[in-house]
């Protein structure tokens, strides 16, 4: 799970420091003062704050769930991963640890934050299109 990947690392990741669980442990609570710098550090401050205002409560269940799949079936799929080198939610070190646990057909790197669909949608679209073209040839 994502929580297992991030938990217990020294130093603690920025998202671990900014996030806590509700009393019933079913929701993640985020320190909104840190949200813009964590999720949208590739955007101008006003845009980031606009997006932070739209964040909602996150269930903790998807973050704690372990992905279950057959390695054989997983490896039969074309796969790719874009390592976001400016991601402060899942830092590159942790992204690489996740990738080391499973095979990945193609690995790209880009100077993206956690939300490239906001901060750099043009480059993200070009990367996704190039991956699609590579797999359909």
Image: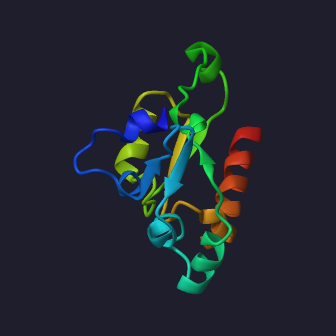
- On the question of residue 120 being in view, the answer is no
Residue drawn at 40 percent across, 36 percent down: 5
Residue 112 place in picture, x, y as percent: 51, 64
Colour scheme in use:
rainbow
Measured along the vertical axis of the image, is residue 18 above or below residue 66? below
Write the residue at 38% across / 44% down: 94
Residue 108 place in picture, x, y as percent: 52, 51
In this picture, is 131 found above or below 36?
A: above
Q: Give me the residue at 43% from left, 45% from top.
A: 95
Residue 117 in view in this figure: yes
Q: Image quadrant for the C terminus? A: top right
- Residue nearer the viewer, 79 or 65: 65
Extreme front residue here? 23
Does residue 33 appear to the left or right of 81 in the view shown? Answer: left
Left or right position of 17 against 38: left
Q: Position of residue 19 (x, y in %)?
A: 44, 53
- In-image side of 130 versus 27 (left or right): right
Residue 100 in the image: state x and y as whole percent: 40, 32
């Amino acid at each position: 799970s994502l929580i297992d990947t991030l938990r217990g690392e020294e130093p603690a990741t920025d998202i671990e420091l900014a996030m806590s669980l509700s009393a019933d442990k079913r929701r993640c609570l985020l320190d909104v003062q840190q949200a813009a710098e964590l999720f949208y550090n590739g955007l101008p401050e006003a845009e980031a704050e606009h997006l932070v205002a739209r964040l909602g409560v996150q269930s903790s269940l998807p973050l704690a769930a372990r992905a279950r799949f057959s390695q054989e079936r997983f490896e039969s799929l074309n796969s790719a991963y874009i390592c976001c080198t400016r991601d402060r939610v899942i830092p590159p070190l942790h992204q690489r640890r996740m990738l080391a646990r499973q095979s990945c057909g193609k690995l790209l790197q880009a100077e993206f934050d956690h939300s490239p669909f906001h901060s750099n949608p043009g480059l993200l679209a070009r990367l996704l299109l190039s991956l699609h073209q590579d797999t359909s040839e």
